[in-house]
Image (tube, helix red, strand yellow):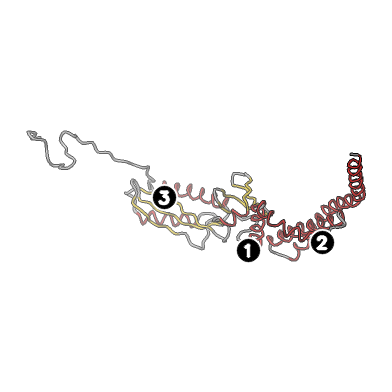
Amino acid sequence: MSQITETIINSLQAILSIGIQRIPGLLTGIIILFLTRYCSEIFQKITKEVTAKTIKNHSLQILADKGVYVGTWVLGVLFACVVAFPGLSLGDIVATLGVGSIAIGFAFQDIVKNFFAGIILLVEEPFRIGDEIAVSDYQGIIEDISIRTTSIRTYQGEKVLLPNASVFTDAVMVKTAYPNRRTDLGVGVDYNTPLPMAKDLLQQTICDLDGVLAQPAPEIDLVSFGDSSIDFIVRYWTTPKQKEVRRVQTLAIIKIKEVFDAADINIPYHIRTLYYYNQDKYNDYFPNQLPAGDDT
């Protein structure tokens, strides 16, 4: 029994001795990690200054910034592991990473998927920071594209973080991709209105409106006979920002109402005409047939 106890004590002493011997290495590894954090911030700052002068593409600037940040941390962690565990070589670390990459891939597949989707979005640049987009149920202005998410500020002033993989795979409407954007505004006039006159008034009104672009030229189309009106569509172009689109649309509605009032053109309400019949004297299948014995 004493021999077993002595063996346990010797083992504990050996473990304690090894632990004490490795304390300087562990402390040095921790210090290296702190230095890595400090260096990553410095390298990020330098990268931002250099890329701002040499790269015009803002998305590539972001990609370079994030690449330097991640690369610095990877090198710092590897160096800290080698210093903290002297018997661990770089080849052993690489081999361990190779074996563990499968498990990491399964455990963090969403993170990895979003990471690579973010890189592709930054490289291909289907949209840029400041563009206005509509994706899924959200519409707003892109504020940032990070390693994991795309951040947009909605028109209601809310911040939405969308996974990069969703943005990459879903249909995205980029509202500010082109220098101009069309608005289709419906206008109805009553059936007594001279249509050529109404069309000319709409054309002149929308062409003279502040914010409406001369090219492409506005178009006025007659589209349908409605229940209570004959319907026009006024098609005009503005700059693509949502704020400008709303402003011009408001001005267009106000001005068209003023012009139509001055020209005595009515924009009718929806009207429904109801006919009442005496059901005793009317047959749905034979309207002209009266009940027997009724000469009226």
Compared across the picture, whether 96 is left or right of 260 comes to: right
Q: Extreme bottom residue here?
A: 54
Query: For this view, does 121 lie left or right of residue 5?
Result: left
Q: Residue at x 49, y 54 (%)?
A: 183
Please name the residue shown 72% across and 56% down the image: 100
Badge 2 vs badge 1, beta-carbon distance below 8 Å: no
The kind of residue tagged 3 is Val
Separation (CA) of disc 3 from disc 2: 73 Å
Mark 1 = which residue?
124
Q: In which quarter of the image is the C terminus?
A: top left
Q: Does label 2 or label 1 sit earlier along the sequence? A: 2
Whichever of callouts 1 and 3 sits on the residue coming sooner in the sequence is 1
User: Does 262 appear above or below 63?
Assistant: above
Mark found first going from the N terminus, 3 or 2 = 2
Q: Tell me: 12 left or right of 138.
A: right
Type of amino acid under label 2:
Leu
Q: How far apart are labels 1 and 3 at the CA level?
A: 41 Å
Q: Position of residue 109 (x, y in %)?
A: 65, 53
Relative to 200, is 19 on the left or the right?
Answer: right
Q: Which of 7 and 66 is in front in this view?
A: 7
Q: What element carries label 3?
A: strand
Please state which of the two labelled residues, at mark 2 or mark 1, is closer to the viewer: 2
**Picture coordinates of residue 291, whole percent (x, y):** 11, 35
Dot 2 falls on a residue whose secondary structure is helix
Q: What residue type is labelled 1?
A: Glu
Which residue is labeled 2 in the image? Answer: 90
- Please name the residue shown 54% across and 54% down the image: 210
- Crowd band around label 1 with a 10 angstrom C-alpha radius: few (<14), some (14–19), many (20+): few
Judging by the rendered image, the residue that carries numbered circle 3 is 187
